[in-house]
Image (tube, rainbow, N blue to C red):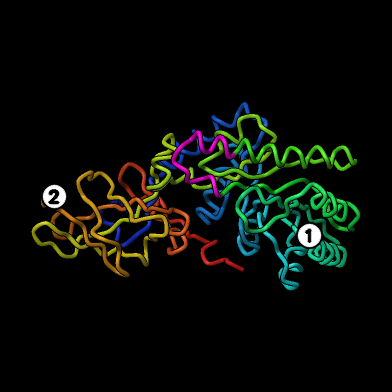
Amino acid sequence: MGQVVKIKREQIETPALVIDLDILERNISVMTDFMKDKRAKLRPHFKTYKCPAISHKQISAGAKGITCAKLGEAEVLVQSGIKDVLIANQIVDPVKIFRLAALADDEAKITVAVDDPDNILALSNAAAEIGSTVYVLVEIDVGMKRCGVNTPDEVFDLAGKIVDSKGLVFEGFQAYEGHLQNRPDIEDRRRGVKEMEEKVGEIKNVLEKRGIPVKEISGAGTGTYNITADNTIWTEIQAGSYIFSDAVYNKIAVEFQNSLSVLTQVIHKRPGYAVTDAGMKVCTVDHGIPEIKNFTDLKIYGNLSEEHGTIIDEKDELEMLQKIEYIPGHCCTTVNLHDRYYCVRKGLLEAVWPILGRGKSR
């Protein structure tokens, strides 16, 4: 049998989504070490990376379970062997509700967020019909102004309905502070978390005085995990982007390094400029244009176009056919543009992981 020749990073066809496995594993270890002495447990968010292989690495490192955004993502996770999944979102469509109840009957603990009494009734009816148990968090609006309720009485009424509903178990609150994640000033984030803790803490006290115990308070992200998880009232931390980091989190969560990049190739070169084969169809710009890895003087000109990136190269550092890497401005949305990760260790391709949760928006 002949010798296996490993592919080098620079031999991967472009554009390609690349993970540096050593950095990925380091980021997981940094988060795991931080969480060791905290009251809260880590429940990482699948919406960032959408790949069960990474979820299993996180579970092996000590995560209690996985968070996701959509029912389709939860189905992918359960099918891969993850047995404790939080859908940090509302599932209200009647067909989806029965899918959810059926998933909860598959030897998995499935938790979902609610903020509406009719939704609670529909979940209960489906769980009772199938014979499954669905765990439920009442969502509190802590500043996102999306889903959720606001007052102690609203939360108490919903929690009481859950407690009285067949097939449902009241677990506590979903309270995610996404509006704080990208604020550059950590003291600003601390103030926001403090305000949020006061609101959620008051609601928790009201429920428990009225006889409804609150087991879980779930929330937080990569921009606030080290505030919210620091022995506050939160019991679960839903951070996701920490495993990859990106151009935004490079300035906010500096303890994590960039393990994710978009590999691209120079396809045109002229004095002062270079053009690559990676545009916004492979690297999103919703949080700003990407950075160029390992080149401090190179900048994207204007914005990415659909298929190209034009780079200002005043020193003519780049050459025709050269391969370079983008650090995306937003890792989560960039991942959703790709079918697979090319996993590299010490410059050599080690594995190709399918992004099985990609496009699972239903």
Q: Main SS type for the magenta part? A: helix
Point out which mark residue 263 bears.
Answer: none
- The answer to whether residue 45 is left or right of residue 113 is left
Q: Which residue is drawn at 53% across and 38% down?
A: 189
- Give the residue number, with chain letter if any, for mark 1: 105
Point out which mark residue 317 bears.
Answer: 2
Depth order, front residue of 208/129: 208
> The disc labelled 1 sits on which kind of residue?
Asp
- The answer to whether residue 133 is left or right of residue 230 is right
Closer to the camera: disc 1 or disc 2?
2
| Residue bounds of the magenta highlight | 179-192
Total marks shown come to 2
Q: What element carries label 1?
A: loop
Depth order, front residue of 317/157: 157
* Residue 236 image offset from top left, x and y in percent: 66, 41
Depth order, front residue of 106/205: 205
* Residue 261 image offset from top left, x and y in percent: 36, 51
* Residue 221 image offset from top left, x and y in percent: 55, 44
Quarter of the image holding residue 71?
bottom right
Depth order, front residue of 180/31: 180
Q: In this view, does 10 lie above or below 183?
A: below
Q: Residue at x 81, y 37 (%)?
A: 205
Q: Residue at x 80, y 63 (%)?
A: 123
* Residue 238 image offset from top left, x and y in percent: 60, 45
> Any magenta on residue 65?
no
